[in-house]
Image: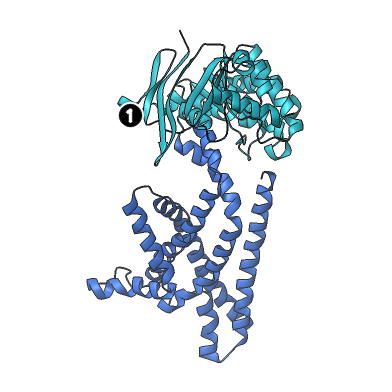
Chain colours: A cyan, B blue
Amino acid sequence: MAILEVKNIQKSFGNTQVLKDVSFSLEEGNALAIIGSSGSGKTTLLRCLNFLEKPNGGSISVCGESLFDACQAQDWEKNLRTKRLHFGMVFQSFNLFPQYTALENVMLAEKLLAQERPDFKQNKAQIITEIEAHAKELLAQMGLSERMNHYPHQLSGGQQQRVAIARALALKPDILCFDEPTSALDPELTGEVLKVIRGLAEQKTTMIIVTHEMAFARDVADQVIFMDEGVIVEQGDAKEVIDNPKAERTKHFLARYTQENN
Amino acid sequence: MFWTVTQSLLGGLATTIEIFLFTLIFSLPLGLIFAFASMSKWKPLKWLMDVIVWVVRGTPLMLQLIIIFYGPGLWLGHNIWNGGEAGRLTATVVAFSFNYACYFSVIFRGGIESVPVGQREAGEVLGMTRSQIFFKVTLLQMIKRIVPPMSNEIITLVKDTSLARIIAAYELTFAGFSFMKSDGLTWPLFYTGVFYLLFVGILTLLFGYIEKKLDYFR
């Protein structure tokens, strides 16, 4: 059974329909890349999955559990926080908390969640130690052990984005989403972030990656979705879609893309 | 004579400090509540707040103080501030707190709105509640941004306390002026100025210290 089922998602801002009937599913352990030009609705789709936007129609379910159904849209606020925790989100502009060190950024949310546990007061010291060990482990995995006590402004863009990935992983989401994770980075810094994401793919982390890095999408993703004007034009095996696109619009987009990069 | 004047000015200074501190204690949280009201999605509340801020910022504090002190006595037929020095101080603190809360609310709103939306969204996707996002993420970033305008406003408050003289509260300026009225002395007025300068000087150092303390992040 697919870990994620997205059916007929629609989203409008005023009179502009940004997503028109988007459906797809994702298997556990797979990486899905979403490609397409700016304004095609890729980011809005990710924001809907993370409950940052409320879709006007459709449904979303994770592990068979319905998280959103437009027919019961009034349940939106109910358990919103719990529903969000199925997804992790890495933003284009990192959005690290500037007043906390890298380590504190990674620990914060987990610590706040732990405070709600009934046994928190009794085992406080032990729980905090565990959270800290977990956060340090994640930062080590990102190659940032040396930098964990630095504040975001003391880190390079690539390092900040890696901290943001560790922060999203700390809550053990079922599905990790990336919204153009390298678009705000200097070209020489994209490599270190892509390497980390590639590592996650090798560990079979379930991921959705909105990206403009075609070569990366082709190598790392299992599936690819090409979006244009709010609809999925083409989807399928990543190598298949990128090497042999079938739809006219996909061919056009990829051709223009290869041209620009040669 | 110098000693007499000093003693009298210290008495006035005590009242000035009382007005200053109590006004801050009440107007800071009230200003935050006003700021949230002025950002409310429920329009009637926002409009009400806009009108209150317009009226309070649009009329002199001295006029507001006179109305709050004398109004109840004239309308209700009895003075709710019960005459004495304590009553005058209470009326002053009420008028000042409301007035300053309105100014603070505008500064707070600017501070909150200047924190990028991405910060709130990052908190949301990490499963934080609204109040956790405000207290753990937004608040400190907002404080850092509002220290300079707040220091302006708080320094103005030090000097605005002298308006309490209009309802005969015995504060610092009242104390200094009384020697001109009774003995024709003008030097106590300059001496009074020195008291204000020292008060504001200490505050300036304090704000500089806070700014420096918050310098560790951007």
Protein chain holding label 1: A
Q: Residue at x 71, y 21 (%)?
A: A195
Above-or-below relation of A165 to B213: above
Q: Quick one: which residue is furthest to the top in this view? A: A1
Question: What x and y, as percent, mark residue B111?
Answer: 54, 52
Asked if one can make out residue B170 in the rendered structure from this viewpoint, the answer is no
Above-or-below relation of A67 to B132: above
Question: What x and y, as percent, mark residue A119?
Answer: 47, 20
**Mark 1, residues whose alpha carbon is within 10 Å: few (<14), some, or many (≥20)?**
some
Question: What x and y, as percent, mark residue B80?
Answer: 29, 68
Q: Residue at x 55, y 81 (%)?
A: B176
Q: Residue at x 67, y 57 (%)?
A: B208
Q: Which corner quadrant of the image does residue A152 belong to? A: top right
Q: Residue at x 53, y 36 (%)?
A: A39
- The residue singled out by tag 1 in the image is A73
Total residue callouts: 1
Q: Quick one: which residue is furthest to the left in this view? A: B77
Q: Which corner quadrant of the image does residue A170 belong to? A: top right
Asked if one can make out residue A61 in the rendered structure from this viewpoint, the answer is yes
Above-or-below relation of B79 to A164: below
Above-or-below relation of B45 to A81: below
The residue type indicated by label 1 comes to Ala
Mark 1 secondary-structure assignment:
helix
Could you say which is closer to the camera, residue B128 or residue B3? B128
